[in-house]
Amino acid sequence: MYTYLSLSVKSRELPHSNHPLAKGMEQDFRLSYFRPELTQKLETSFCSTDPLVASDFARATFYSDNRQDLAKVTLPSLILQCAEDAIAPTSVGEYMHRHLAQSNLRLMKATGHCPHMSHPQETIDMIKEYLICR
């Protein structure tokens, strides 16, 4: 069994659940989401996803490498880096900041990987601040 947001899913339903990033996701979501309404919302969303779509998404997420594409980005970018994100640790945000020509890296107090859900106000405030300063 694979635990994901207090959601038990048989490993055959979540492809590549033995991948290190998937293991990090399990820990990340368990540590980050203590709000029952989020758990319910995400559980409903995950359970309603077509297994073939979920499989394609997981494959693309865990086995894609687009680092070479960062140099092609010419627009200003805001990178919101959460604290204690097991999926994308601070080193990932720092890497992106170094390789995106016009990037602005902001470190958040929010923990986990989905601050737009777990800490929406901090996310909104940082995006607004970025847009106002541009």
Image: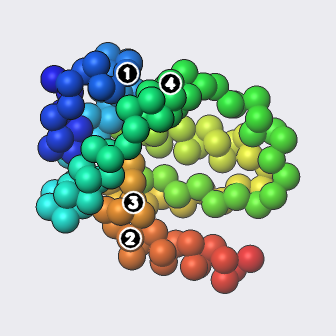
The answer to whether the residue labelled 4 contacts the one labelled 3, judged by CB atoms less than 8 Å apart, is no
Q: Relative to 52, say whether 76 is above or below.
A: below
Q: Please name the residue that numbered disc 1 is placed on.
A: 15
Relative to residue 123, is residue 10 drawn left or right? left
Label 1 vs label 2, nearer the camera: 1
**SS of the residue under disc 3:** helix
59 shown above or below 117: above
Amino acid type indicated by mark 4: Arg
Res. 59 mark = 4
- Residue 84 in the image, given as x and y percentages of width and height: 33, 45
Disc 2 + disc 3, Cβ < 8 Å: yes
Q: Is residue 131 left or right of residue 62?
A: right
Q: Nearer the viewer, residue 48 or 108?
A: 48
Q: Amino acid at mark 2?
A: Pro
Which quadrant is the C terminus positioned in? bottom right
Mark 1 or 2, nearer chain start:
1
Residue at (21%, 45%) from the top-left corner?
5
- Sequence-wise, which precedes: disc 2 or disc 3? 3
Nearer to us in this view, 118 or 94: 118
Quarter of the figure with the N terminus: top left
Mark before the other along the chain sequence, 2 or 4 = 4
Residue receiving disc 3:
115
